[in-house]
């Protein structure tokens, strides 16, 4: 038996501890990894700090900060049309508006899948399915996100080629190839459709800054098969069953 497998019966299915925590709705898989490394997770009373650890769901007691984590359950899936000026976070020490102010009272805790910065708006998925969140955000699963972006000035053909083929946004950090298409023009600004399959922090703003066309407005309209549609600004609704099926399938979880 591997030192990372602490299960007594090898005939039962094993699940990585961070995946178990994510599936149980504790947090995203990435956050679960941090909890493990911080020594805040125990299995059958034993503190675990190894990310490769596997357990038997339902057969062993898992706790985070002393609280028992229940096995996987039905999940919550919500779509929000986040307004500008609202933080994509569950709390803010400075008392600024957050997405929690728009959610109202929910039967269980959900967390946002990725972030839209303070000045960005549009489609935000909220769930307690940490495994889905991990897959939608990780570039290896290639789940596309579509944005409508308005920038100052008129990007040239060369600018578009640079943006679509990959641009260095920080020393040694280059974006992956993406789709960048002009969909509208005005005298001093241009509107573009941008489709990414990755999601670095403030990536689109950094991309257009690199070609000297700062972003004036940024709105996410699609995430995989999910479309914002006519959901009003600040509105939030549950995903329909067929939408849940499609987003799970897009993430390889059907």
Image (tube, grey):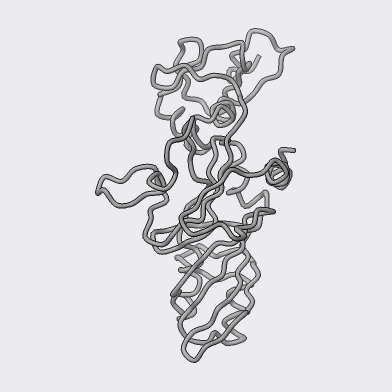
Q: Is residue 149 above or below residue 19?
A: below
Q: Is residue 246 above or below residue 109?
A: below
- Which quarter of the picture shows residue 74? top right
Q: Is residue 156 left or right of residue 119?
A: right
Give the quarter of the figure containing the C terminus. Answer: top right
Residue 177: x %, y % from top left: 64, 67
Residue 67 or 81: which is nearer the viewer?
Answer: 81
Q: Is residue 116 left or right of residue 85?
A: right
- Label count reads 0
Give the quarter of the figure containing the N terminus. Answer: top right
Q: Is residue 69 above or below residue 202?
A: above
Q: Is residue 182 above or below residue 243?
A: below
Residue 232 or 163: which is nearer the viewer?
Answer: 232
Identify the residue at image location x=45%, y=63%. 120
Identify the residue at image location x=51%, y=38%. 30
Residue 152 or 62: which is nearer the viewer?
Answer: 152
Residue at the farthest left position? 94
Identify the residue at image location x=59%, y=20%. 71
- Which quarter of the picture shows residue 76? top right
Residue 36: x %, y % from top left: 46, 27
């Amino acid at each position: 038996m591997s030192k990372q497998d602490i299960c007594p019966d090898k005939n039962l299915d094993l699940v990585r501890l961070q995946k178990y925590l994510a599936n149980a709705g504790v947090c995203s898989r990435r956050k679960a990894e941090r909890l493990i490394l911080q020594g805040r997770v125990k299995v059958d009373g034993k503190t675990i700090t190894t990310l490769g650890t596997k357990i038997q769901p339902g057969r062993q007691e898992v706790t985070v900060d002393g609280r028992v984590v229940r096995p996987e359950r039905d999940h919550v899936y919500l779509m929000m049309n986040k307004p500008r000026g609202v933080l994509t976070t569950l709390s803010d020490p400075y008392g600024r508006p957050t997405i929690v102010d728009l959610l109202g009272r929910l039967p269980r805790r959900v967390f946002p899948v990725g972030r839209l910065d303070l000045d960005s708006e549009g489609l935000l998925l909220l769930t307690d399915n940490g495994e889905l969140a991990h897959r939608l955000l990780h570039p290896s699963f290639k789940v596309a996100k579509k944005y409508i972006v308005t920038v100052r000035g008129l990007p040239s053909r060369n600018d578009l080629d640079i943006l679509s083929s990959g641009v260095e946004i920080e020393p040694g950090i280059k974006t992956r190839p993406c789709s960048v298409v002009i969909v509208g023009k005005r005298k001093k600004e241009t509107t573009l459709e941008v489709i990414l399959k990755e999601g670095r922090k403030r990536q689109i703003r950094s991309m257009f800054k690199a070609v000297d066309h700062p972003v004036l407005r940024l709105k996410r309209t699609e995430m995989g098969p999910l479309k914002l549609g006519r959901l009003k600004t600040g509105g939030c609704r549950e995903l329909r069953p067929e939408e849940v099926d499609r987003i799970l399938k897009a993430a390889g979880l059907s």
